[in-house]
Amino acid sequence: MGGPEGAPIGGDVPDLAGGGVETSGPDARPGLELIVRDLARALDAEMALLAVAGPAPDEMEVLAAWGAAPAPMGVVARVLQSRQAVIEAIELDPGGLDPHAAAAAITHVVAAPVRAPAGPTGVLCAGLASGSVPDLTMTLWLAKSYARLASLCLQDPGALDGLLAGGGHDALTGCLTQAALVHELGREIARAERDERPFSCCFIDLDHFRRVNDGYGHLHGSRVLASVGEILRAAVRTADTVGRYGGDEFVVLLPGTDEATALELAAHVRATIARTMINLPHDPLDASIGVAEWHPGATPEALLGAADEALLAAKAAGGATAVGASGLSTGTVTVKDVLDVGAQFDESGGASVELTAWELDTQVVRVMPAWSRAIKHGLLEPVGKDPLTGEEMWRLSDEGRQALECPAT
């Protein structure tokens, strides 16, 4: 790719378009999205995009974008015309940012031309919010290097097939792998702490996915997972990140988003999955989602754990719903409370989470954390559904009886 080349900072202050740029056009490819996202990671950028010249002289088409900060289309237009890589210092009023933007104000833009002999001419750019660019030469060289990869992808779509797997993407679903997701989670938490902005994540688990594999075969199950990956990436916003955590579990990272807004997005995602998966007429697919908001000092593991607890609560409620972790933390119901009610109804066929909440004179959401922990640790075992109400019924397992008799152990 050649060595680094320097360039001065300069140029007019660009006009900036609104944030949340969407990818579009027949040339949009997963390889392009990967290049744009990886450039943003390499530069710790607030946004990045790849745009190509449109059919009209003044038109540009965005093929891939990442981030929620405003897109510096003025810089893109100038680089498209000059075909010279630049780093420009800019000024931007933070009050002009989209209220949902998940990034600090951009202070510098680096942009490099994308030249594809058999394809369209374009520009790859990234917006930085560091206040200064510590290494101008290396920053410009990275932009040029990624621009060459973009040129290759535009010229030969099959040339970057291996890059998807190498770049931390799951081959089946196109989402980030678990390792890449955890890395991105740490990066987003550091960004949220630095910019003092909210950040949330969703833990998604498909309901009764085993029925798909058992009833239609594992090959069809793989097709369903691939479709869910596409649905999730299409349903979330440009700045959000979707990863496959394992099996039929997915995680969505939502920068610049508090828990209340994340719950709204989760409800939209769940409804989209249920509405879109119409190829299983006898086993319609749905999902349970746990939502948690990051709080200062919380580790990536703690945030995922909170979202997982909320997911378990959603499962305990019967699935096909989204539950927020903050609603669970206010409950005072203990595992012993749950086991006490279970013992009370053990002889009559067991208890449900709804019956437990009624017996404890509290809301179901306050029972869910303890109920989920009891199930997770094997203290409750399923006995089927109540024929009248359809509720899932549970009774104490042998471990549950021992725990109730010897709570200290």
Image (cartoon, rainbow, N blue to C red):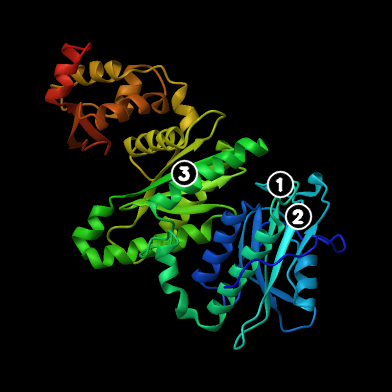
The relative height of residue 72 versus residue 335 in the rendered view (above or below) is below
Q: Amino acid at mark 2?
A: His
Label 2: few (<14), some (14–19) or many (≥20) C-alpha neighbours in 10 Å: many
Q: Are marks 3 and 2 in contact (CB under 8 Å)?
A: no
Nearest to N terminus: mark 3 or mark 2: 2
* Foreground residue among 198 and 120: 120
Residue 187 placement (x, y as % from top left): 54, 45
Q: Are marks 2 and 1 in contact (CB under 8 Å)?
A: yes
Q: Amino acid at mark 3?
A: Cys
Taking 79 as reference, is 307 left or right? left
* Foreground residue among 34 and 256: 34
Which residue position is annotated with label 3?
A: 202
Taking 402 as reference, is 364 left or right? right
Disc 1 vs disc 3: which is toward the camera? 1
* Foreground residue among 395 and 328: 328
Q: Amino acid at mark 1?
A: Ser
Q: Quadrant of the C terminus?
A: top left
